[in-house]
C-alpha cells in the first residue's frame, strides 16, 4: 500500500509489510516453508552474502518472517524488527547483545518473572550485575545508574502489578548515563503504546500475548529505533539462533490483523469489569490503569492510548478467598498467559512469579492475595456474572 506511514492504526495493522504475491497474486502472504534459497549463479550467491538484497538461508532471513518483522516495526515506529522463537528469546537477544563482563543493567522490579530471574541466576556467570527498582518513581532509577550501566530495562504496564513507568523521564536518565532504554511493551501492545516515540531505543514483545492473540503460538519480536542498534542485534540473534520458523510467522501475521479489533473489545470489557470489581464488597483492592483510583492514572492517559485489558485485584480473605475465586470460574479459564481472545485468570505468587524469592516478590508488590485477570472478548454479561458468582462463594 502506498504511503502506509500516513494511514491510520487499523489500516497499518492490516497492511504494513503485506503485499500481493508477485508470482501468483495471492493476497495472503504465502508461507515460504523452506530452509534455503537457490542462487542464480556464483556471483549472485556472493552478492547476497556481501549484504545485497536476497534471501540466503531461513535463519538469516525469510520472506514470511520478514513480512511480520516489517509489520510490527511499522506499528512501533522503528527502523526494523527481528522475530524470535519466543518472547524470552527476544528478551535474551537484547541482554546478550548489550550486556557482558563488567556491565550493569537497571530494571523495573516488577518484571515478567523469567525476564528478572534470568538476570539474577544466569547472567552473573558472564559477569553481569543487575539492580531492580520501583521505576514508577524515576528517581529510584537515577540512584542506581553507574558508569557500567549499558541497559535500562522497563516493563510498563508492569506484570502483574500494573504499575506504570514514565518512559520519557527514564529515557532522559538512561541517555544521560550513556545507556540504551529498552521497553517490554507486551501488556499494552503497539495499538495502545509506542515506547520508541517516547524516547526508548528498543521495544520488545512477547507476541504470544496480544499481538498473536489466539493462544495458539509462542513468539517474540524486537524492534529498534535506529539501524546501528538493529544491525548489532541481528548479528547476535542470527548467531545465537533463537530465530522464528516461517509457519510460526504466518500464524502471527494471521493473528495480528485483528489486533485493533480485539484490543478495542477486550479493553471495553475490562473497563466495565474493573468498575464492577472496584465497587464489589468482597474486593479488597484493585489496580487497573483505566480506573481513576490507579495511582498513575494521569501518566497512563499521557503515554498510552488506552488502559489495556489486564488488571490485578485482591479478594477480602486473602490467598484462600482468592483460590476460591480462581478455582470456581466457568467463563474465565485458570491459566497463565494473557492477551488472547479468551479471559484468563491466574495467581502470580504461586505461578508466573513463583521463582522470584519471597522478600523480593513482596518488595515488588506481588502480594500473596494478588489475582491477575486478563480480560478477553467474550460477552460482557457472561464475564461479570462469572465473577459475581465466584466472589459470592469467597
Ligand atoms: C509472556 C511474557 C514474556 C515472555 O514471552 P514468551 O513468549 O512466553 O517467551 C515476556 N514479557 C512479558 C511482559 C510477558 O507477558
Image (cartoon, rainbow, N blue to C red):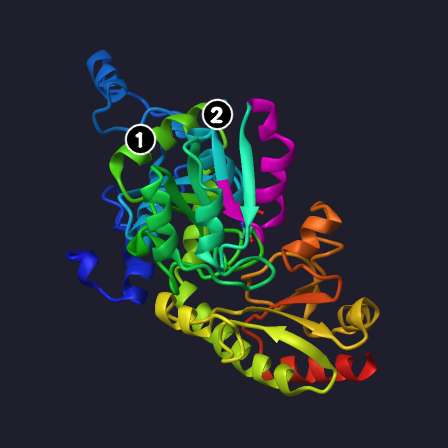
Asked whether residue 206 is in view, the answer is no
Kind of element beneath mark 2: loop
Is 153 situated above or below 286?
Answer: above
Residue topped by disc 1? 231
Q: Is residue 83 magenta?
A: no
Residue at (42%, 40%) from the top-left corner? 83
264 vs 99, nearest the viewer: 99
Residue 369 location (% of width, % of height): 74, 66
Residue at (38%, 61%) from the top-left corner? 193
* Residue 378 location, quadrant: bottom right
Q: Residues within 10 Å of mark 2 (few under 14, many from 20)?
A: some
Q: Kindly identify which numbered label has been placed on residue 89.
A: none
Q: Is residue 100 left or right of residue 56?
A: right
Residue at (42%, 57%) from the top-left corner? 256
Is 310 situated above or below 223?
Answer: below
Q: Residues within 10 Å of mark 1 (few under 14, many from 20)?
A: few
Tell me which segment is drawn in magenta.
106-126
The prevailing secondary structure element of the residues shown in magenta is helix
Q: Is residue 171 left or right of residue 361?
A: left
Q: Is residue 305 left or right of residue 310?
A: left
Kind of element beneath mark 1: helix
Q: Is residue 122 magenta?
A: yes
Asked whether residue 228 is in view, the answer is yes
Residue at (22%, 29%) from the top-left corner? 53
Of all residues, the one furthest to the left in this rendering is 3
Tell me the quadrant of the picture where the N terminus can be found.
bottom left
* Residue 124 location, quadrant: top right
Tell me the quadrant of the picture where the C terminus can be found.
bottom right
Q: Kindly identify which numbered label has been placed on residue 100.
A: 2
Residue 248 location (% of width, % of height): 49, 44
Residue 237 location (% of width, % of height): 43, 30
Amino acid at each position: 500500500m502506498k504511503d502506509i506511514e500516513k494511514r491510520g492504526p487499523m489500516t497499518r495493522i492490516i497492511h504494513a509489510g503485506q503485499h500481493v504475491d508477485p508470482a501468483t497474486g495471492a493476497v495472503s502472504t504465502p508461507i515460504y516453508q523452506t530452509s534455503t534459497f537457490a542462487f542464480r549463479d556464483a556471483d549472485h550467491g556472493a552478492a547476497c552474502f556481501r549484504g545485497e538484497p536476497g534471501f540466503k538461508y531461513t535463519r538469516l532471513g525469510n520472506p514470511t518472517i520478514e513480512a511480520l518483522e516489517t509489520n510490527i516495526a511499522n506499528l512501533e515506529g522503528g527502523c526494523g524488527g527481528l522475530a524470535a522463537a519466543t518472547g524470552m528469546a527476544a528478551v535474551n537477544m537484547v541482554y546478550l547483545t548489550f550486556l557482558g563482563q563488567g556491565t550493569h543493567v537497571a530494571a523495573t522490579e516488577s518484571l515478567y518473572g523469567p525476564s528478572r530471574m534470568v538476570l539474577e541466576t544466569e547472567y552473573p556467570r558472564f559477569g553481569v550485575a543487575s539492580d531492580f527498582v520501583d521505576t514508577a518513581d524515576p528517581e529510584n532509577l537515577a540512584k542506581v545508574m553507574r558508569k557500567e550501566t549499558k541497559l535500562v530495562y522497563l516493563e510498563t504496564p508492569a506484570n502483574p502489578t500494573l504499575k506504570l513507568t514514565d518512559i520519557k523521564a527514564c529515557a532522559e536518565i538512561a541517555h544521560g548515563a550513556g545507556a540504551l532504554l529498552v521497553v517490554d511493551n507486551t501488556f499494552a501492545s503497539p495499538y495502545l503504546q509506542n515506547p520508541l516515540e517516547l524516547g526508548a531505543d528498543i521495544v520488545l514483545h512477547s507476541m504470544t500475548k496480544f499481538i498473536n492473540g489466539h493462544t495458539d503460538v509462542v513468539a517474540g519480536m524486537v524492534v529498534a529505533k535506529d539501524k546501528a542498534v538493529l544491525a548489532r542485534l541481528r548479528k547476535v540473534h542470527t548467531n545465537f539462533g533463537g530465530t522464528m520458523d516461517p509457519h510460526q510467522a504466518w500464524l502471527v501475521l494471521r493473528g495480528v490483523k485483528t489486533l485493533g479489533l480485539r484490543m478495542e473489545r477486550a479493553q471495553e470489557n475490562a473497563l466495565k469489569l474493573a468498575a464492577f470489581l472496584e465497587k464489589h464488597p468482597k474486593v479488597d483492592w484493585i489496580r487497573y490503569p483505566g480506573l481513576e483510583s490507579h495511582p498513575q492514572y494521569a501518566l497512563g492517559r499521557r503515554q498510552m492510548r488506552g488502559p489495556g485489558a489486564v488488571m490485578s485485584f485482591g479478594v477480602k480473605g486473602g490467598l484462600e478467598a482468592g483460590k476460591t475465586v480462581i478455582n470456581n470460574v466457568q467463563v474465565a479459564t485458570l491459566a497463565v498467559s494473557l492477551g488472547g481472545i479468551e479471559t484468563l485468570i491466574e495467581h502470580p505468587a504461586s505461578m508466573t512469579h513463583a521463582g522470584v524469592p519471597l522478600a523480593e516478590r513482596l518488595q515488588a508488590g506481588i502480594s500473596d492475595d494478588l489475582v491477575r485477570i486478563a480480560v478477553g472478548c467474550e460477552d460482557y454479561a457472561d464475564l461479570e456474572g462469572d465473577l459475581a458468582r465466584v466472589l459470592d462463594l469467597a
